[in-house]
């Protein structure tokens, strides 16, 4: 969510109080201007690192793969499912980054990028893309680039040759998206073929029946801007029709909308409602459509929804999904990271107190795990462990600072910046976190990272004179693209006003209350914001307490949760009976649960039973038989110096690395024989080192015993299944051999083929490679404690601000990257018993590789020289792999 203040005043000056920014006195010490400038410059350097690596190693591909230093081309890489629908072979990252270049004062680079887009990008590819993603990233990027080109041209020094070419491309793309709206409801199909539109199975489109609420409701800003720029009302008309239909289908009692809707009938397919994934930007675009277009109807609808959100979903500082028909009934026990945009939207709304509270909760979770996990529970534990470098938390941080001028939010921004440098920076860019607990990476750098993250961090630390233009003359789309507020007075079709008057809805001026409050009235006490934050910080720090759930009438206790259930607990069985849930013991020792709602003691108990069953299915798919979290193999020798971390599967025997504060560190040696299934011929070389072994031919425990007998410190088993990768497969854990394995005392870890090859290629190139086996990636200051630090590893000033906080993840934490894990342990062949050389399949949601630093005190030349050394190693790996 992104917007400005002046826009409100331009729209409804008679209804809104002026917002006086900066009236809140500091509850913490002001950050010196020199420090803000240093951080601003560091943001620019980080952007350069990401953008230049994309241009050098990936362009014209859609996105950069920062671990392997190459471009992600759809069809040439293993499919990642729906996530690849954002890729259309149209140089996505370049288009998404255009207005970021302009905002960061990179005028020459912006002009060069525009020329590249005009000369190289094609929009008529025979490829199926997401309507939602293509709209916010590509259409929004082209319109934002067009806005910046016009601004620079008006300045008289740059872009003088520009004749609306980006706008022509935007119109072409808009026309290619329009066929998706050819439905009886006006809701768009979720996908469209760029060349053939929506024609049915032959174009791989037109067969879907459902779409998410945000997918259909996050169109109006880009389509209305396109209509206003071109004078063609067709785009805005279609976007308005979709919003009208969603509004009409809201649940009339709760005034909430569901997560997924049938595009033909309008029936809600998923009836859970929140402010996170699936709905988030629908609410955002209602408010911003009012800001950009000046249509009071959008504000009325937003305020109606917002009142229900605050009544049912908001449980400060939490935001919990509910059922639209029974909004007092929670639908989830966890929150997703996309809701981090909501405090920023509340700032725009003017409801700053809950914005401060929710933002502080998110910040404390971030401090626990370095990044916001993709999903986390109500007691702040990891639910889904990945983090794809999402910008929403930085976005809300910027807007809270803009509203309060509290320097506390500058320190929050510093934390975000330094964590990106310490844990996500790699030689070829910034890599998404596969698992925030281990610090491992995924070979992924989404275009939104360049489009959004660096905009908000730059604006957070920049002074007004640092900006090439006044951002308050623009509104930010959900992808942070800049659209000028002057569009509100541009061409307006008569169709728009006619559509509005036929709704029969009257505006209630009370809905405009608090749209833009005076912060002096909200914060008479300069310490007030801090007083809101302190209880939340305490709550998160206090051993991650679980919130008290609602109690069933007459029961006198909270409803039973799936994670607490024990089949041999008589009290639990009685609770199941009251909820209408029967427990059946199967012959193989397993138990089966069946619910009959009519047998529950009350309607509330039946709802509790339904939730219990849903939770149990979720747990069984994600966590059944999962006993150990992922481990990390961190390469600590030159030139990697701890920046490369490989996601490793654990063993059910041997040393428990989670109980070791230092892990096991040593140089790697390939075992002979490589299988490790017989007595080792190079035992002398293995003594005091870590053995590399190939999967296959014998039990894992047998391999461990052979290398332990040779005196090895530990072992790493590399998958022999060529092409396997933790990017595309859930992690495995290695089982024992059915016998007592207490004699195995060293650690044994498992790497898929792709991750193992990175280690083997490093060994071929550098001969001596030292690794650290641990439960999670170590901070490099800890790795090199007692040794002379490489210049790139010197501790940055910000590292000393906060002590390392207790990790809230329990040892048995299930950090699933998706709720569809297949539980159990497998043998080498399907008929082999547990314990054969095949680890138990685990869906632990780790991500490939971690960490980079960001020491701003060292010279830029030294930093770049360090990166160059690393880059050469990775380039050699890439050549060998190809």
Image (tube, rainbow, N blue to C red):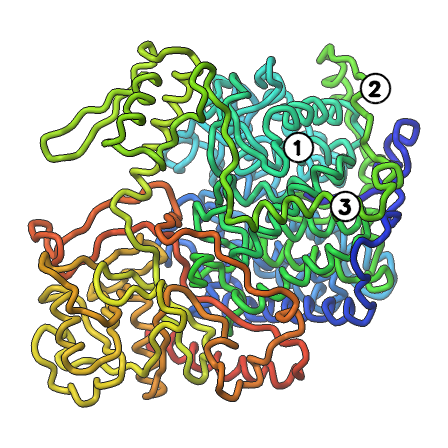
Query: Are there few (<14), some (14-19), or many (20+) residues within 10 Å of tag 3?
Result: many
**Badge 2 is on which residue?**
509
Q: What element carries label 2?
A: helix
609 relative to 864 in the view: left or right: left
Query: Are there few (<14), some (14-19), or many (20+) residues within 10 Å of tag 2?
Result: few
Of tags 2 and 1, the one toward the viewer is 2
Q: How many marks?
A: 3
Picture quarter with the N terminus: top right
> Which residue ends up furthest to the right in the rendered image?
14
Where is residue 677 shown, x and y percent of the image? 10, 73
**Badge 3 is on which residue?**
529
**Badge 1 is on which residue?**
235
Between discs 3 and 1, the one toward the N terminus = 1
Q: What element carries label 3?
A: helix
Regarding residue 170, the answer to whether it shows in the image is no
Name the residue nearer the viewer: 300 or 542.
Answer: 542
Picture quarter with the C terminus: bottom left
Q: How far apart are marks 2 and 3 (CA)?
A: 29 Å
Write the residue at 57% across / 54% down: 366
Q: Residue 699, relative to residue 782: is it above or below?
A: above
Q: Distance between the residues labelled 2 and 1?
A: 30 Å
Write the residue at 37% across / 64% down: 775
């Amino acid at each position: 969510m992104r917007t400005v203040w002046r826009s409100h005043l331009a729209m409804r000056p008679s209804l809104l109080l002026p917002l006086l920014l900066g009236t809140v006195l500091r509850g913490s010490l002001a950050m010196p201007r020199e420090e803000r400038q240093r951080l601003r410059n560091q943001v620019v350097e980080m952007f350069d690192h990401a953008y230049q690596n994309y241009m050098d190693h990936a362009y014209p591909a859609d996105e950069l793969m920062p671990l392997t230093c190459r471009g992600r081309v759809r069809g040439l890489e293993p499919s990642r499912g729906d996530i690849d629908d954002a890729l259309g072979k149209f140089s996505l990252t370049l288009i998404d980054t255009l207005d970021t270049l302009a905002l960061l004062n990179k005028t020459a680079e912006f002009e060069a990028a525009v020329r590249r887009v005009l000369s190289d990008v094609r929009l008529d590819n025979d490829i199926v893309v997401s309507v939602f993603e293509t709209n916010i990233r590509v259409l929004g990027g082209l319109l934002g680039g067009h806005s910046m080109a016009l601004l620079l041209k008006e300045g008289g020094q740059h872009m003088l040759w520009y004749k609306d070419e980006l706008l022509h491309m935007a119109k072409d793309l808009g026309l290619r998206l329009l066929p998706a709206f050819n439905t009886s409801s006006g809701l768009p199909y979720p996908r469209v073929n760029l060349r053939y539109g929506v024609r049915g199975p032959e174009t791989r489109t037109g067969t879907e029946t459902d779409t998410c609420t945000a997918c259909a409701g996050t169109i109006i800003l880009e389509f209305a801007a396109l209509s206003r720029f071109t004078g063609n009302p067709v785009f805005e008309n279609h976007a308005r029709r979709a919003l009208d239909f969603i509004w009409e289908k809201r649940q009339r009692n709760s005034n909430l909308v569901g997560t997924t809707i049938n595009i033909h009938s309008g029936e809600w397919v998923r009836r859970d409602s929140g402010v996170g994934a699936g709905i988030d930007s629908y609410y955002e675009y209602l408010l911003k459509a009012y800001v950009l277009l000046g249509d009071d109807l959008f504000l009325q609808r937003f305020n109606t929804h917002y009142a229900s959100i605050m009544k049912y979903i908001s449980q400060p500082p939490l935001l919990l999904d509910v059922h639209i028909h029974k909004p007092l009934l929670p639908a989830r026990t966890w929150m997703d990271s996309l809701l981090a945009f909501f405090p920023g939207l509340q700032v725009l709304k003017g409801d700053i107190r809950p914005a401060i509270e929710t933002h502080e909760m998110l910040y404390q979770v971030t401090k626990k795990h370095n990044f916001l996990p993709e999903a986390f529970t109500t007691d702040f534990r990891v639910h889904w462990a990945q983090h794809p470098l999402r910008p929403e938390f930085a976005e809300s941080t910027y807007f809270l600072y803009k509203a309060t001028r509290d320097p506390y939010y500058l320190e929050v921004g510093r934390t975000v910046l330094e964590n990106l440098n310490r844990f996500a920076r790699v030689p070829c860019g910034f890599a998404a976190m596969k698992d925030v607990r281990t610090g491992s990476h995924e070979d992924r750098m989404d275009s939104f990272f360049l489009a959004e993250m660096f905009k908000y961090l730059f604006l957070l630390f920049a002074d007004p004179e640092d900006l090439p233009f006044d951002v308050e003359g623009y509104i930010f789309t959900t992808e942070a693209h800049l659209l000028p507020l002057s569009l509100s007075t541009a061409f307006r079709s008569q169709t728009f006003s006619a559509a509005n008057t036929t709704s029969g809805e009257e505006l209630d001026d009370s809905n405009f209350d608090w749209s833009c409050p005076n912060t002096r009235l909200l914060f008479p006490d300069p310490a007030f914001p801090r007083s809101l934050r302190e209880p939340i910080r305490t709550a998160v720090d206090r051993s991650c307490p679980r919130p008290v759930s609602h109690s069933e009438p007459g029961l006198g206790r909270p409803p039973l949760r799936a994670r607490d259930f024990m089949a041999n607990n008589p009290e639990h069985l009685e609770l199941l009976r009251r909820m209408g849930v029967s427990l059946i013991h199967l012959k193989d020792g397993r138990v089966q649960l069946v619910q009959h709602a009519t047998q529950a003691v009350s309607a509330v108990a039946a709802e509790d039973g339904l939730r219990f069953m849903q939770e149990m299915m979720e747990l069984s798919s994600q966590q059944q038989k999962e006993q150990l979290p992922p481990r990390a193999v961190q390469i600590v020798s030159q030139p990697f110096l701890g920046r490369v971390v490989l996601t490793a599967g654990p063993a059910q025997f041997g040393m428990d690395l989670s109980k070791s504060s230092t892990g096991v560190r040593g140089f790697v040696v390939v075992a002979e024989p490589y299988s490790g299934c017989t007595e080792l011929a190079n035992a002398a070389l293995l003594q005091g080192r870590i053995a590399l072994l190939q999967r296959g031919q014998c039990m894992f425990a047998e391999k461990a015993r052979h290398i332990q007998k040779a005196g090895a410190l530990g072992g790493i088993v590399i998958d022999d299944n060529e092409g396997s990768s933790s990017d595309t497969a859930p992690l495995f854990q290695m089982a024992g051999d059915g016998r007592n394995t207490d004699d195995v005392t060293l650690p044994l870890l498992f790497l898929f083929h792709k991750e193992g090859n990175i280690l083997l290629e490093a060994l071929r190139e550098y001969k001596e490679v030292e690794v650290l086996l641990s439960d999670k990636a170590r901070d490099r200051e800890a790795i090199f404690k007692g040794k002379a630090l490489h210049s790139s590893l010197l501790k940055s000033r910000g590292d000393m601000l906060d002590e390392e906080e207790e990790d809230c993840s329990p040892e048995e934490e299930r950090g699933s990257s998706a709720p569809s894990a297949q539980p159990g342990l497998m043998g080498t062949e399907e008929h082999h018993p547990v314990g054969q050389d095949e680890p138990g399949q685990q869906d632990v949601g780790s991500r490939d590789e971690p960490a980079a630093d960001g020491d701003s005190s060292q010279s830029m030349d030294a930093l770049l020289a360090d990166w160059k050394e690393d880059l050469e190693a990775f380039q050699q790996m890439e050549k060998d792999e190809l």
